[in-house]
Structure formats: structure tokens, C-alpha cells
């Protein structure tokens, strides 16, 4: 067996204390990499850290005390010392962008280890602070050895990634197909009793860029059923909008566990993903829906969503921000069940070919090996 590779992941948030797309990506990669003789340590900040590392799925999570949270970024004084200590013990540092504090750690501490960054997304929301942050970001991206884009679509459409095209690799995000085959019959029966008619599903955090307000407008004055699973800061606003529109065909399910998620994915007629801004860089829940063979509807925003959902093959791609287009797409799938079924089959086939956790792990492992060779 090849020599063990020790990797330090530096990220903004991590399981088990936070849940989201990047957290799921890191968990999947670290879990799968344990089969490749890779030892992973995840370093992140938290307001109330534990004294001991957290062991999860074959890797360690080290929480460092957060001293300040500003502009969606955590900062820590003690992290500098801990980062230096950990950097001496490992072989490779794997950063997850965007995370300005990680840029600061890298530039200030100058670790003499190979480094790469998975570039999950451009920074979209902080339009004014980005000008202050730009010099640090450029210095950081200039100094890392490799940059990984999660889809060819995002690589092409990101001005920043194009500037560093000579050191960018594309490795698509992957998930474990077997995890979506374990269906809990009791949960299936529970949700089948609740949804007697065909319904479209959305799963994810209710963030501003998810386009859920567009989905609510799309089903107003129709009989199209949608179920929304997830929680976040704008849940109240969305429920208020649904009340104002007098929507009886929208179900807010709140937080759901993995058993319910898989049951709902298998039961739904199709999956909607109305994210309308580039803050949505990939969409793991969109990938989950294709993995179970569901036709999907997403928007063309120049990111990985259209890499997962190949237009007119695995689903329908619509213009961002258009309730009318979303309504037409859902109605078309309902009116054409054979087309919907074919798209679902194509979606699963494409996911198994391009988006598995095993393939993702193998490609990152090869990249790790190449970095170690370059630095010896």
C-alpha cells in the first residue's frame, strides 16, 4: 500500500456542528479518502469549541475558538498558533474557498507544505468589502499550488478562475450512490399518506439565492404541488409570502433527517432547483435528485447546476428569476410522464458516470500525489 498522506482541510464550517453543501462535500471526500490511506484533519472555527477533536466518519474535526464574526466570516486569534502546529504534522493543506480567514492564515503563516484550494464559489454578496479583500485574495490564490473548480461550467464563467487557468483542475463533486438506495419503508408510507398527488420537491437551506420566492409565485393559482424541505433565516418571509398568495399547494416540511430525505426523493415526481444567482455554485441536492433518477428543473446561471442538469437530457433548464418559465416546465413534465421518466433515467445514468464519491476521491488522490512529487 502507498505511504499514508496526511491532509489538513481548512474550511469555514464543518460537520457535525454545521450543515450545508460545502460541509457535505468535505465529509464525503474525507470519508471516501479513508479507503485510500489518506488521514484527514478538518480545522474550522466555532464560538463554543470542544477541547478534544471530534471523530466523525474516519476523520478528525478540530474546532478553534471564534473571536469575531463579521461579513459572513469567522476570525480567531488562537487559530494562528494551532494552524502552524498542524501544518508541521501534515503533508498537504487543502483550503476551501471562499473563506477569507483561511487566506489570512496562509499568507501570514507561510506554511512550507504543498497546498491546493477547492474553489466552491465566487464571492457574490459582499460587493463593497470585496474591494478591501481583493489584495489578500490575489496573494492567496497566487501562492497556492493548485486550484480545483467543481465544474467546467464554473471554470469557464468565473473571471477569477480564468486568471489562474494555468493551475486550475476540474474535479466534479460526487456522492455515494449506495447511500440513496437504502429506503425506509415506514418513512415511504408516512410521506405517501401525506402526498397523495404527484409533487415537486425542493431540499436545501432557504437562502436568498435559492429562488424559492420564485417557486411560490410559479405555483400561485395552479394545482401544482410542491414540498419544501429545509430551514434558514428567510423561512418566515417565504411562509408569509405563501399566506399572502393563499397557497394551499405548498408544504413547508422544515428540517428533515436522511431517512426522510431519501424517502421524499424517491417519492417525488420531479425536483425543482430555482436558484437564480451565482452564489449557487453546484447544488448537491440537485445531484441527489438525479442520483435517484428524477427529472430536474434548474436555472441557467453559468455554474455547476447546468453541468449536473444537462438541458433536455436530464431535465429542463430555464431562465433565472422567471416564475412563468418554472410553471411551464413543471406543467410540461406533469403533462408528459414518458418524457419525465426518460429524463429521470438519463439523470441517474449521467450521475453514475460523472458524479460518484469514488471518482471524486480518486481524482483528488491523484492530485495529492502529484503535489507531493512536485515538492520533493
Image (cartoon, rainbow, N blue to C red):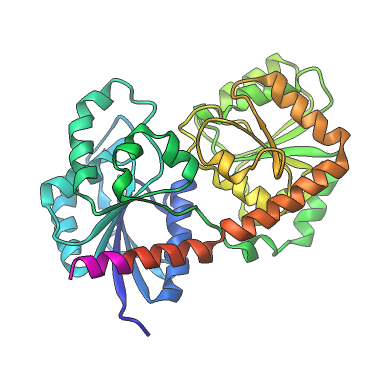
Q: Is residue 236 left or right of residue 19?
A: right
The magenta segment:
369-376
Magenta stretch containing residue 317, yes or no? no
Residue most extreme to the top: 244
Where is the N terminus found, in terms of image quarters? bottom left
Residue 329 in view of the camera = yes
Nearest to the observer: residue 167 or residue 27: 167
Question: At 49% across and 40% down in the image, what residue appears?
Answer: 153
Percent position (x, y) of residue 12?
33, 46
Q: How many marks?
A: 0
Q: Is residue 189 left or right of residue 28?
A: right
Placement of 30 over or under 316, stated as above or below: below
Magenta stretch containing residue 375, yes or no? yes
Q: Is residue 159 left or right of residue 308?
A: left
What secondary structure characterizes most of the magenta part? helix
- Asked which quadrant contains residue 262, the reply is bottom right
Q: Is residue 350 left or right of residue 121?
A: right
- Asked which quadrant contains residue 183, the reply is bottom right
Percent position (x, y) of residue 74?
28, 40
Where is the C terminus found, in terms of image quarters? bottom left
Placement of 10 over or under 286, stated as above or below: below
Percent position (x, y) of residue 307?
56, 43
Nearest to the observer: residue 33 or residue 163: 163
Nearest to the observer: residue 293 or residue 58: 293
Amino acid at each position: 500500500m502507498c505511504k499514508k498522506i496526511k491532509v489538513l482541510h481548512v474550511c469555514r464550517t464543518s460537520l457535525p456542528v454545521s450543515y450545508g453543501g460545502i460541509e457535505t462535500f468535505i465529509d464525503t471526500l474525507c470519508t471516501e479518502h479513508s479507503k485510500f490511506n489518506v488521514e484527514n484533519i478538518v480545522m474550522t472555527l466555532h464560538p463554543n469549541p470542544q477541547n478534544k477533536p471530534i471523530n466523525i466518519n474516519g476523520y478528525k474535526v478540530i474546532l478553534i475558538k471564534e473571536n469575531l464574526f463579521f461579513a459572513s466570516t469567522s476570525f480567531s486569534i488562537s487559530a494562528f498558533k494551532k494552524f502552524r502546529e498542524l501544518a508541521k504534522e501534515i503533508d498537504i493543506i487543502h483550503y476551501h474557498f471562499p473563506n477569507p480567514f483561511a487566506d489570512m492564515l496562509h499568507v501570514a503563516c507561510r506554511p512550507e507544505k504543498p497546498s491546493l484550494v477547492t474553489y466552491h464559489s465566487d464571492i457574490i454578496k459582499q460587493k463593497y468589502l470585496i474591494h478591501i479583500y481583493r489584495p489578500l485574495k490575489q496573494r492567496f490564490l497566487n501562492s497556492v499550488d493548485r486550484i480545483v473548480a467543481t465544474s467546467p461550467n464554473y471554470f469557464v464563467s468565473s473571471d477569477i478562475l480564468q486568471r489562474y487557468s494555468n493551475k486550475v483542475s476540474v474535479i466534479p463533486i460526487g456522492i455515494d450512490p449506495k447511500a440513496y438506495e437504502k429506503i425506509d419503508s415506514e418513512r415511504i408510507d408516512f410521506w405517501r399518506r401525506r402526498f397523495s398527488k404527484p409533487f415537486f420537491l425542493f431540499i436545501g437551506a432557504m437562502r436568498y439565492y435559492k429562488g424559492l420566492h420564485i417557486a411560490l409565485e410559479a405555483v400561485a393559482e395552479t394545482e401544482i404541488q410542491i414540498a419544501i424541505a429545509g430551514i434558514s433565516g428567510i423561512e418566515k418571509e417565504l411562509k408569509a409570502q405563501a399566506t399572502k398568495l393563499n397557497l394551499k399547494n405548498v408544504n413547508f416540511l422544515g428540517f428533515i433527517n436522511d431517512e426522510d430525505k431519501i424517502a421524499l426523493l424517491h417519492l417525488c415526481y420531479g425536483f425543482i432547483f430555482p436558484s437564480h444567482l451565482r452564489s449557487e455554485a453546484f447544488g448537491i441536492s440537485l445531484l441527489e435528485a438525479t442520483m435517484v433518477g428524477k427529472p430536474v428543473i434548474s436555472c441557467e446561471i453559468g455554474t455547476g447546476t447546468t453541468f449536473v442538469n444537462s438541458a433536455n437530457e436530464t431535465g429542463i433548464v430555464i431562465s433565472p428569476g422567471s416564475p412563468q418559465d418554472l410553471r411551464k416546465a413543471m406543467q410540461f413534465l406533469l403533462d408528459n410522464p414518458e418524457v419525465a421518466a426518460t429524463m429521470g433515467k438519463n439523470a441517474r445514468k449521467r450521475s453514475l458516470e460523472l458524479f460518484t464519491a469514488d471518482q471524486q476521491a480518486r481524482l483528488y488522490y491523484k492530485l495529492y500525489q502529484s503535489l507531493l512529487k512536485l515538492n520533493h
